[in-house]
Amino acid sequence: MQDKEGQTAAPPVGEGAEGPTQEAPPGEQETRLEEQSEGGATGEAESPAPERPAVPEEEAAGAYRERIASLEREVADYVRHLQRLQADFENFRKRVRREQEELRERVTEDLLRRLLPVVDNLERAVAAAEQDGASLENLQAGVTMVYRQLAEFLLKEGASPLVARGETFDPTKHHAVATVESEEHAENTVVDELQKGYLFHGRLLRPALVRVAKRPAAEKVIPLRPEEGECDG
């Protein structure tokens, strides 16, 4: 369309070359916008994510078998190690037991070797007593010599006699076999020693068998009963 001056005028808004463009109703426009937005969202959601490269099943099974074999080898190594430790410990116990027995035998051997001279002197005393014309004094002298030698041996080994006579009764060192009434000794005083006790390096080796004093029982005074039939004057 040309105006009066011959210029072409722009078509009014909403009109095209083919004629006026009809505008869609508001409800239809909203529906189209929703379809476009849903289509865009659906397209984004349906886009496939990048897939990881699949591991072949044979390859995975081989890896598991290799791991199991490795663990079985470790278990076998631990078992062999424990078996060696058990064998070493058993050998150690046997060696310690054998060494203890050998030590005990050596100590006993040394003790017996030092006791032999005492036995020799005792044999000489007995042989001297069996000779003709042997006197009691000679026999007593021989036995006394053997006793002194044995007492010195015990002292060297750490065994000392326990003094009990005249001491207060001590149940940790004395074993009372009887009680004796005595006015000369205080109560619970050891008045007699039946068997000597010994200490070994300060520890009790054997208690002494003793008799212990106790107070005499009080005499009961029985009152005299008057004779029957007796009367005064």
Image: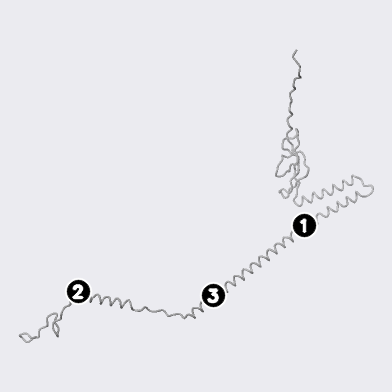
- Distance CA(mark 1)–CA(mark 2): 121 Å
Task: Identify the residue at image location x=22%, y=75%.
Answer: 31
Of badges 1 and 2, the one in the foreground is 2
Q: Is residue 51 left or right of residue 36?
A: right
Q: Secondary structure at mark 1?
A: helix
Of badges 2 and 3, the one in the foreground is 2
Which corner quadrant holds the N terminus?
Answer: bottom left
Residue under numbered circle 2: 27
Q: How is the image coloured?
A: one colour
Q: Residue 82 location, x and y as percent?
A: 62, 68
Instruction: Residue 108: give its label.
Output: 1
Q: Are marks 3 and 1 in contact (CB under 8 Å)?
A: no
Q: Residue 166 location, x and y as percent?
A: 75, 39
User: Which of pointers 2 and 3 lies earlier in the amino acid sequence?
Assistant: 2
Instruction: Residue 3: give its label.
Output: none
Task: Identify the residue at image location x=77%, y=57%.
Answer: 108
Q: Is residue 8 left or right of residue 185?
A: left
User: Which of pointers 3 and 1 lies earlier in the amino acid sequence?
Assistant: 3
Q: Please state which amino acid type lies under the numbered disc 3.
A: Ile
Q: Residue 195 location, x and y as percent?
A: 78, 44
Q: Quadrant of residue 172?
A: top right
Using a 10 Å C-alpha cutoff, classify the residue at mark 1 as few (fewer than 14 neighbours), some (14 to 19) or many (20 or more): few
Residue under numbered circle 3: 68
Which corner quadrant holds the C terminus?
Answer: top right
Task: Indicate whether 69 appears above or below 104.
Answer: below
Q: Please state which amino acid type lies under the numbered disc 2.
A: Gly
